[in-house]
Image: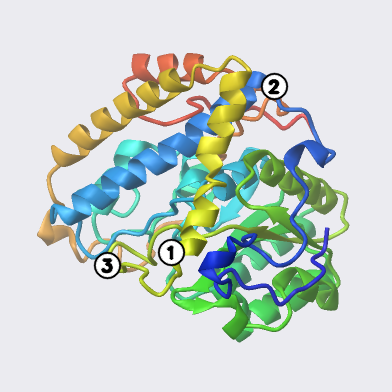
């Protein structure tokens, strides 16, 4: 599935021509890809997780505009299929290092508590950052999610180190890392690619190519696409429709299986479009409106809702369920006090023994103990008083 013309650019099209979003060959749709089965309950949960990501981020933008969120707020509108589909393919003992600006869906798949996420964004006391950080700088080690740093793609280097530890310990575990097209330019990216390919580290590498590094289009970043460059580092490069959640799941599952066999890493280049600015402070006026209009037709949630609605899924019930949990989580977060300023110096130095990364949720039905029914999961979460979106109980050992 390598591209024919690697010098693609989503922003060099004439508005009156109503062009295809990409000049190169379109990726194969999900139904043409071989891969593991997804039950209807799996598909409903994929939809629910994408809706949860978008609904949360829409509320986050509103809170930012109300002046309740310090700093800025970053969202992944239009890119929900990538983190949700990729994380859905990972087992409970796998590690995600690390979800970035557009990857809220990965946190939700793994089971990070939604109230804690909102507390973090609001600067309230919380277990993820204790109110010492904000916006996208967080992770949940208890769910196997390593927190990110701003320097991109420095976390790719960390992910390769984690994967190397898995290989040296002969553990059947895989690391998953995300980054954007702009992050393929710094030297750290090339160093990590070279090391991972040379040592055949068990890592799945996801490039979210949304055509822009902040405001710089891909045509001004590189002459050869990330997927084409993978071969130079000794690994396959796969191009996938980043707006197709099932395609993302299947290519990630295949890459994970390859890593578990000892065949090394896979670079997945997920083609998508960033439908908002870089952050809430950016109006994205540098993007041709015709490009947005073309990609809006391929909205990952709207198209998947149409598919599942035709299969009998109650789409409105999914949205209602997500909204109810979001409202409860926001109310709880707003009622949480700010952290005590006197605690600001606590935790500056590591004084305790390191704690191993925890196990994340693995909701795909192909994993033993996976949560198959989002309705039942929601009921259990409500009964337990939690606000986790998606699966609510830790999955057992992976079936394979």
Q: Nearer the viewer, residue 189 or 341?
A: 189
- The mark lying in front, picked from 1 and 2, is 1
Left or right: 345 as drawn, with respect to 5? left
Tell me the quarter of the picture where residue 303 sits: top right
Residue 111 visible, this orientation: no
Q: Which mark is residue 61?
A: none
| Label 1 – label 3 distance at C-alpha | 18 Å
Residue 255 picture location, percent across and down: 78, 51
| Label 3 – label 2 distance at C-alpha | 40 Å
Residue 315 picture location, percent across and down: 48, 22
The residue that mark 1 highlights is 289
The residue that mark 3 highlights is 281
- The mark lying in front, picked from 3 and 2, is 3
- The mark lying in front, picked from 1 and 3, is 1
The residue that mark 2 highlights is 39
Q: Choose the circle earlier in sequence order: 1 or 3.
A: 3
**Badge 2: few (under 14), some or many (20 or more) residues near its Cα, within 10 Å?**
some
Mark 2 and mark 1 in contact (Cβ < 8 Å)? Answer: no
Q: Choose the circle earlier in sequence order: 1 or 2.
A: 2
| Label 1 – label 2 distance at C-alpha | 37 Å
How many numbered badges does the structure rendering display? 3
**Badge 3: few (under 14), some or many (20 or more) residues near its Cα, within 10 Å?**
few
At x 51%, y 74%, the residue is 152
Image: 50 above or below 103 = above
Image: 323 above or below 266 = above
Q: Choose the circle earlier in sequence order: 3 or 2.
A: 2
Residue 62 picture location, percent across and down: 22, 48
Q: Nearer the viewer, residue 94 or 89?
A: 89
At x 74%, y 66%, the residue is 24
Residue 52 picture location, percent across and down: 42, 36
Query: What is the secondary structure assignment of the residue under circle 1?
Result: helix
Query: What is the secondary structure assignment of the residue under circle 3?
Result: loop
């Amino acid at each position: 599935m390598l591209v024919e013309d690697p010098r693609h650019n989503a922003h060099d099209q004439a508005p009156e021509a109503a062009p295809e979003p990409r000049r190169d060959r379109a990726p194969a749709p999900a139904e043409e890809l071989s891969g593991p089965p997804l039950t209807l309950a799996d598909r409903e949960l994929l939809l629910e997780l994408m809706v949860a990501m978008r609904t949360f981020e829409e509320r986050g933008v509103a809170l930012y505009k109300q002046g309740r969120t310090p700093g800025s707020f970053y969202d992944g509108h239009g890119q929900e299929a990538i983190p949700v589909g990729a994380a859905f393919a990972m087992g409970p003992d796998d590690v995600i290092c690390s979800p970035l600006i557009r990857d809220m869906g990965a946190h939700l798949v793994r089971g990070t508590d939604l109230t804690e996420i909102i507390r973090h964004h609001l600067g309230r006391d919380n277990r993820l950052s204790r109110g010492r950080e904000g916006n996208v700088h967080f992770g949940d080690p208890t769910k196997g999610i390593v927190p990110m740093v701003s320097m991109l793609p420095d976390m790719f280097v960390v992910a390769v180190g984690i994967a190397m530890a898995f290989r040296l310990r002969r553990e059947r575990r895989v690391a998953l890392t995300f980054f954007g097209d702009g992050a393929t330019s710094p030297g750290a990216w090339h160093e990590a690619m070279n090391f991972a390919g040379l040592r055949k580290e068990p890592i799945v590498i996801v490039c979210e190519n949304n055509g822009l590094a902040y405001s710089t289009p891909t045509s001004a970043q590189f002459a050869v696409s990330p997927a084409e460059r993978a071969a130079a580092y000794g690994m396959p490069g796969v191009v996938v429709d980043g707006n197709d959640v099932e395609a993302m799941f299947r290519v990630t599952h295949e890459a994970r299986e390859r890593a578990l066999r000892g065949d090394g890493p896979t670079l997945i280049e997920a083609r998508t479009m960033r439908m908002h600015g870089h952050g809430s402070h950016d109006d994205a006026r540098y993007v041709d409106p015709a490009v947005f209009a073309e990609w809006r037709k391929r909205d990952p949630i709207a198209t998947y809702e149409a598919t599942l609605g035709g299969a009998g899924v109650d789409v409105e019930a999914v949205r209602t369920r997500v909204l109810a949990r979001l409202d409860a989580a926001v109310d709880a977060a707003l009622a949480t006090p700010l952290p005590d300023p006197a605690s600001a110096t606590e935790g500056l130095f590591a004084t305790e023994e390191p704690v191993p990364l925890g196990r994340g949720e693995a909701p795909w039905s192909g994993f033993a103990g996976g949560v198959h029914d989002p309705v039942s999961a929601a009921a259990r979460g409500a009964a337990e008083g939690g606000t986790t979106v998606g699966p609510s109980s830790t999955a057992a050992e992976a079936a394979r």
